[in-house]
Image (spheres, grey):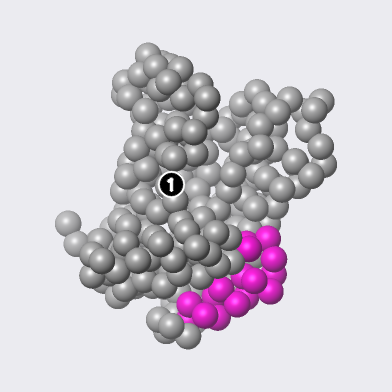
């Protein structure tokens, strides 16, 4: 199936590794020109090197999505390099888990700012380009954690907030040809998850408790993002798609 992404410009935040990297690779495989944005500039460069080895057009940019000036420079550089931005994937995020009685203000702010403030700044920066060309796709990476997880008050709140943000943006921008959707992954087999000391227990629990009896792969999320970013999803906006193997 031709998703109609050839020569579209896709900006993916937090794309040096994990789910973001898989999304960048999937969009590049569809012919999109990809901007790999990450606070880890070295990791972003390495990801782009791998993409370019496959023949993809890609650009690495070190960026802090919580900093307004950094985001403005990110978008400006992307437009200078590729002419515009057609697709934005707000993927940047991380966890800092602990019970709320042990959670400091810095622990709360760090997680919420990257996920929510980052999505706000990046979305606001790309929308003028999308509305001018009357075409755009914004995909926000939420999480099954939006339903609430013990020890993840900061992360769960931010991912739930991202869903509300998605729906507000879809209502504001549909008339300009811009769709905005969210994806909620379940447990995904990324480098970060594999580094957890109890990874094997996580995998065993996923195989036991998930209707699709396995842990998720980054490619599972990337495939859904590619669909939402494509012409095939032109009548889908303000929606949330779970990629959780049927576990809600």
Residue closer to the observer: 87 or 131: 87
Image quarter hosting the N terminus: bottom left
Residue at 52% from the left image edge and 29% from the top image edge = 196
Magenta stretch in the rendered image: 64-79
Count of numbered badges drawn on the protein: 1
Closest to the observer: 105 or 212? 105
Q: Position of residue 195 (x, y in %)?
A: 49, 33
Assess whether residue 13 is covered by the magenta stretch.
no
75 inside magenta stretch: yes
Q: Quadrant of residue 211?
A: top left
- Observer-nearest of 238 and 210: 210
Image location of residue 81, percent across then percent down: 43, 83
Residue drawn at x 38%, y 65% is 48
Q: Residue at x 63, y 58 (%)?
A: 118
Q: From the top left corner, tell me how far across and down residue 121 is, in percent.
A: 64, 65
Helix, strand or loop: magenta stretch: helix
Q: Quadrant of residue 156?
A: top right
Task: Residue at the far top: name it.
Answer: 208
Q: Secondary structure at mark 1?
A: helix
Residue shown at 68% from the left, 74% from the top: 69
What residue did someone put label 1 on?
Answer: 18
Left or right, 228 with respect to 152, comes to: left
């Amino acid at each position: 199936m031709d998703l109609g992404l050839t020569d579209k410009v896709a900006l993916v935040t937090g794309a040096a590794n994990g789910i973001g990297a898989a999304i960048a690779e999937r969009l590049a495989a569809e012919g999109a020109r990809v901007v790999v944005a990450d606070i880890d500039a070295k990791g972003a460069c390495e990801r782009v090197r791998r993409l370019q080895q496959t023949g993809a057009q890609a650009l690495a940019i070190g960026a802090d999505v919580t900093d307004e000036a950094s985001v403005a420079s990110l978008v400006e550089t992307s437009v200078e390099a590729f002419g515009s931005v057609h697709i934005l994937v707000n993927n940047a995020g991380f966890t800092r888990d602990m019970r709320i009685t042990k959670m400091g203000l810095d622990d709360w702010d760090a997680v919420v700012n990257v996920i929510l403030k980052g999505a706000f700044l990046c979305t606001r920066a790309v929308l003028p380009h999308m509305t001018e060309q009357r075409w755009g796709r914004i995909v926000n990476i939420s999480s099954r954690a939006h339903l609430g997880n013990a020890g993840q008050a900061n992360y769960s709140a931010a991912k739930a907030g991202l869903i509300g943000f998605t729906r507000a943006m879809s209502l504001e921008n549909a008339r300009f040809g811009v769709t905005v959707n969210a994806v909620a992954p379940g447990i995904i087999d990324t480098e970060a998850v594999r580094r957890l000391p109890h990874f094997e227990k996580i995998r065993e629990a996923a195989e036991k408790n998930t209707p699709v009896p396995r842990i998720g792969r980054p490619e599972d999320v990337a495939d859904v993002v590619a669909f939402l970013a494509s012409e095939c999803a032109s009548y889908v906006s303000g929606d949330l798609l779970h990629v959780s193997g049927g576990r809600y």
